[in-house]
Amino acid sequence: MDRREAITQVSWLLGGTIVGGSIFLESGCKTSTEKAKDFFDTETIALLNEMGETILPKTSTPGAKEAKVGEFMAVMVKDCYTKKDQGIFREGITRLEKRCKEDTGKTFMECTPEERTKFFVKMDGLQKAYMDAKTAEQPSHYFRMVKELTLLGFFTSEIGATKALRYIETPGRYDGNVPYTKGDRMWANA
């Protein structure tokens, strides 16, 4: 079983409670053999990687770009999103680039990390306001999709699970009372 199939199975088991799970449940995520580059071009995947890196930058642990979240996002959008949600995501990337150019005078790729962060803080505020006001029939905001896929892609990657989280490949038993000290990393497979 590969990573995408495992994520699909977990989303079914958890009843869609994982980040962005409702999209997976509604679409019946089907893994295909096509590569992500068949759906998004190389430049868009690089842009998605940079967006992910802005959301989860490299610090003492690896960043989202090292986990290749751009390629992950492309595969998940292509394989797991409905046609409608695919369109929202793809159009959203275009709108995000246009908005960045209007706000900063530069494309997202031309912006400094500080400018990217400032721009994303603004986009996050707009996304939150939209999500608070939307009805159940309205689609999710495209920026929320980017954030959700970044988090999902990073924390389910080998790098995210082993470098940012604590991971035991095969736990010997369930222990519901593991001591936690403030500042400890979260468990990847608890």
Image: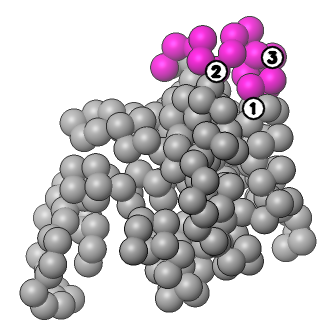
Residue assigned mark 3: 102
Q: Secondary structure beneath disc 2?
A: helix
Characterize the local packing of mark 1: few (<14), some (14-19) or many (20 or more) Cα atoms within 10 angstroms. some
Q: Residue at x 25, y 40 (%)?
A: 61
Instruction: Tell me what residue is drawn at x 66 percent, y 43 percent.
Output: 38
Residue contact at pointers 1 and 2, CB within 8 angstroms: yes
Q: Quadrant of residue 170?
A: bottom left
Give the main secondary structure of the magenta stretch: helix
- Counting residues from the N terminus, which is met first, the one under dot 1 or under dot 2? 1
Q: Which mark is residue 108?
A: 2
Residue 6 percent across, percent down from the top left:
44, 74
Q: Which segment did they paint magenta?
A: 97-113
Mark 1 sits on what residue? 96
Q: Residue furthest front?
A: 33
The residue located at (51%, 34%) in the rendering is 49
Amino acid found under the numbered disc labelled 3: Glu
Q: Residue at x 38, y 44 (%)?
A: 67
Q: Position of residue 34 (x, y in %)?
A: 61, 53
**Side (left or right) of 107 relative to 47:** right
Quadrant where the N terminus sits is: bottom left
